[in-house]
Image (cartoon, rainbow, N blue to C red):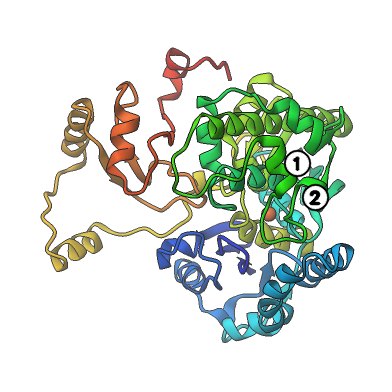
C-alpha cells in the first residue's frame, strides 16, 4: 500500500511517501523551488516522492492531508465572532484564500494529483504531529507531547502511543499557545513569525532573563502541571494583523523592533526571558506527562519541539529515560506523520518497534545525486572542479578545516527537516573561537549571533560537553 502524506497552504509545504509502513521519501517544497517556507501545493516534492518510489499517481492508494480544513475554518469563524467587530480586517484578509482554495480541499487535491483514484483522509493537525513523533520512534510504547502555534484548535497535546495506535488524552486550545507566545516575542524582537523563532533562541544566550517576572505577572498564568492560560489583553494574534499590541508595548518598554534595525541588549534580554519561560513550561509539562502516562519514553513534535535548547534541558534533567524527537518537528513533518497515521491508525497495520532503532533513516529522506549527475552539472555550468577518491578527499578536507577554513559538504540524500545533519552542511572547526563569526560572514544575510551545531564522535562526547547520556 502506497500512502502519500501532504502538508501545505500554511507554511513549509511538504510531501512524504510511505510504502507498507516503510518511509520511502520525504521532502519540503522549498528545497525544489528555492522559496523559503514555500506554502504552495508541494508539486515538486510529490513528484520527487513518486520518482523515488518508482511509481505514478495511479499507484497511490491513500492521500493523507495533515489537518482538517473545515475544523480550522470553524476556528477562524468562531474567533472572528468572539472578537467582532475587532478583527474585521484580518478576517477580510484571510477569507479570499479560504473561499478560493482551502474550503475546497478535496477538489483541490484531486486537481493537483491527476491520476489519483484512491481515498483521501484527514487526520487532525496534532494527530499528524503525534504520529510523526511516535510511529517512526524506536519505542513500542511511549508518551508523546506535541507543542506548536496552532492547528485546528489544539496548540498542545499529550497522550500515549501503544504499538500501532496513538491516543491523545489532553489538549490545550487556541488562543492559549506556547508556540504563539514564542512567536509574539519573535515578532516583538523584530523577526519574522513562523521562521525567525530559531533566531530568538540563538539570541537568548546573549541576554539576561530580566522580563521573566513580567511575563508571568501579565502574559501567562502557568500552573504546576505545565498547563497555562494567556491573557489576551496583550496579544492581537486572535483578531488583529499583528502578534502584540499597545498594552504589550507599555509593559516591555516601547514598540516592537523594526525588522533589520540594530539589535540591542533589550532584544537579547527579551529573547532570554521568553526562552527561560518556554523551558520552564516544557519542563513542567514533561514531568506531568511522565506522571500521568507512567511511560518511561517520550516522543516530541510540533514546532516548539525544534527548540533544541529546551530539549537539551529535558534530556539533562532526565525527566524521561529516553527521548525521541521528530527531526522535522514542524508542519513539514506532519506530511510524514499523516502518511504514517494512514498506515497504522487508519489501515490498522501492525507495528513492531525494537525499542532501539528508529525508522526515520537518520532523516536522510530527500533527493540524492550520482557522481555522474554532479559532474555533468559542473561541466555544463563551467564550474572548475577536482575529483578525488574518498580517502584523499577526506584528508584534504580535514587539512582545510584545520586551517580554519569553511567547507560546503554535500553527500547522499538530503535531510528532511530544518537541520543540516551532514548531508547538506556548511562545516568548520568548532574548536576555533572565531569560526562562528567567520562562518556567519560567509553566508549571505546571516546575523553574526546565529549559532551552529557542533558535531562530535559519540565516544568523544564527554571530552567536549557537560552531558552524560
Ligand atoms: Fe503544527
Label at residue 469: none
In the rendered image, residue 92, in percent from the top left (x then y), is placed at 72, 75
Label 2, residues with CA under 10 Å away: few <14, some 14-19, many ≥20: many
For residue 73, what is the image quadrant?
A: bottom right
In the image, taking residue 403 as reference, residue 65 lies left or right, namely right
In the image, taking residue 8 as reference, residue 170 lies left or right, namely right
Residue designated by label 1: 144
The residue nearer to you, when weighing 303 against 123, is 303
The residue nearer to you, when weighing 139 against 204, is 204
Q: Quadrant of the C terminus?
A: top right
**Residue at (36% x, 58% y) in the render:** 368
Residue 378 makes an appearance in the image: yes
Compared with residue 215, is residue 115 higher up or lower down, i.e. above or below?
Answer: below
Is the CB–ligand 1 distance for label 1 below 8 Å? no
Compared with residue 348, is residue 141 higher up or lower down, i.e. above or below?
Answer: above
In the rendered image, residue 66, in percent from the top left (x then y), is placed at 69, 63
In the rendered image, residue 158, in percent from the top left (x then y), is placed at 81, 43
Secondary element at image label 2: strand
In the image, taking residue 131 as reference, residue 220 lies left or right, namely right
Compared with residue 308, is residue 112 higher up or lower down, i.e. above or below?
Answer: below
The residue nearer to you, when weighing 1 against 459, is 459
Q: Nearer the viewer, mark 2 or mark 1?
A: 1
Task: Tell me which label, 2 or 1, sits earlier in the chain.
Answer: 1
Quarter holding ligand 1: bottom right
Residue designated by label 2: 166
Amino acid at each position: 500500500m502506497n500512502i502519500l502524506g501532504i502538508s501545505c497552504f500554511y507554511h513549509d509545504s511538504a510531501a512524504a511517501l510511505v510504502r507498507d509502513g516503510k518511509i520511502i521519501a520525504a521532502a519540503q517544497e522549498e528545497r525544489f523551488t528555492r522559496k523559503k517556507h514555500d506554502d504552495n501545493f508541494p508539486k515538486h516534492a510529490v513528484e520527487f516522492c513518486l520518482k523515488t518510489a518508482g511509481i505514478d499517481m495511479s499507484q497511490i492508494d491513500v492521500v493523507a492531508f495533515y489537518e482538517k480544513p473545515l475544523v480550522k475554518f470553524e476556528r477562524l469563524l468562531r474567533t472572528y465572532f468572539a472578537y467582532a467587530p475587532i478583527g474585521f480586517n484580518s478576517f477580510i484578509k484571510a477569507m479570499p484564500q479560504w473561499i478560493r482554495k482551502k474550503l475546497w480541499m478535496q477538489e483541490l487535491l484531486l486537481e493537483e494529483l491527476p491520476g489519483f483514484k484512491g481515498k483521501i483522509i484527514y487526520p487532525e493537525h496534532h494527530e499528524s504531529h503525534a504520529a510523526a513523533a511516535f510511529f517512526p520512534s524506536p519505542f513500542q510504547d511511549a508518551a508523546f507531547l506535541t507543542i506548536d502555534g496552532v492547528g485546528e484548535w489544539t496548540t498542545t497535546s499529550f497522550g500515549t502511543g501503544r504499538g500501532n495506535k496513538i491516543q491523545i488524552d489532553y489538549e490545550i486550545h487556541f488562543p492559549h499557545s506556547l508556540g504563539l507566545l514564542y512567536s509574539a516575542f519573535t515578532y516583538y524582537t523584530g523577526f519574522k513569525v513562523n521562521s525567525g523563532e530559531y533566531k530568538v533562541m540563538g539570541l537568548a544566550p546573549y541576554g539576561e532573563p530580566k522580563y521573566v517576572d513580567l511575563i508571568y505577572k501579565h502574559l501567562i498564568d502557568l500552573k504546576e502541571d505545565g498547563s497555562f492560560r494567556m491573557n489576551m489583553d496583550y496579544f492581537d494574534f486572535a483578531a488583529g494583523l499583528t502578534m502584540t499590541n499597545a498594552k504589550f508595548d507599555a509593559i516591555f518598554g516601547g514598540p516592537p523592533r523594526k525588522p533589520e534595525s540594530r539589535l540591542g541588549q533589550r532584544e537579547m534580554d527579551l529573547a532570554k526571558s521568553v526562552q527561560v519561560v518556554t523551558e520552564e513550561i516544557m519542563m513542567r509539562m514533561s514531568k506531568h506527562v511522565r506522571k500521568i502516562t507512567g511511560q518511561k519514553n517520550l516522543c516530541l513534535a510540533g514546532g516548539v519541539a525544534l527548540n533544541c535548547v529546551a530539549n537539551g534541558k529535558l534530556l539533562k534533567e532526565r525527566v524521561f529515560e529516553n527521548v525521541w524527537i521528530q527531526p522535522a518537528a514542524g508542519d513539514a513533518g506532519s506530511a510524514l506523520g499523516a502518511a504514517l497515521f494512514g498506515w497504522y491508525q487508519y489501515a490498522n497495520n501492525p507495528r513492531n518497534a525494537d525499542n532501539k532503532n528508529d525508522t526515520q533513516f537518520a532523516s536522510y529522506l530527500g533527493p540524492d545525486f550520482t557522481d555522474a549527475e554532479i559532474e555533468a552539472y559542473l561541466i555544463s555550468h563551467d564550474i572548475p572542479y577536482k575529483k578525488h577518491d574518498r580517502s584523499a578527499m577526506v584528508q584534504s578536507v580535514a587539512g582545510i578545516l584545520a586551517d580554519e577554513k569553511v567547507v560546503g559538504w554535500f553527500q547522499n540524500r538530503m535531510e528532511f527537516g530544518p537541520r543540516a545533519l551532514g548531508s547538506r552542511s556548511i562545516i568548520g572547526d568548532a574548536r576555533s573561537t572565531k569560526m562562528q563569526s567567520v562562518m556567519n560572514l560567509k553566508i549571505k544575510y546571516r546575523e553574526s549571533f546565529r549559532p551552529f551545531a557542533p558535531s562530535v564522535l559519540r565516544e568523544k562526547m564527554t571530552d567536549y560537553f557537560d552531558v552524560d547520556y
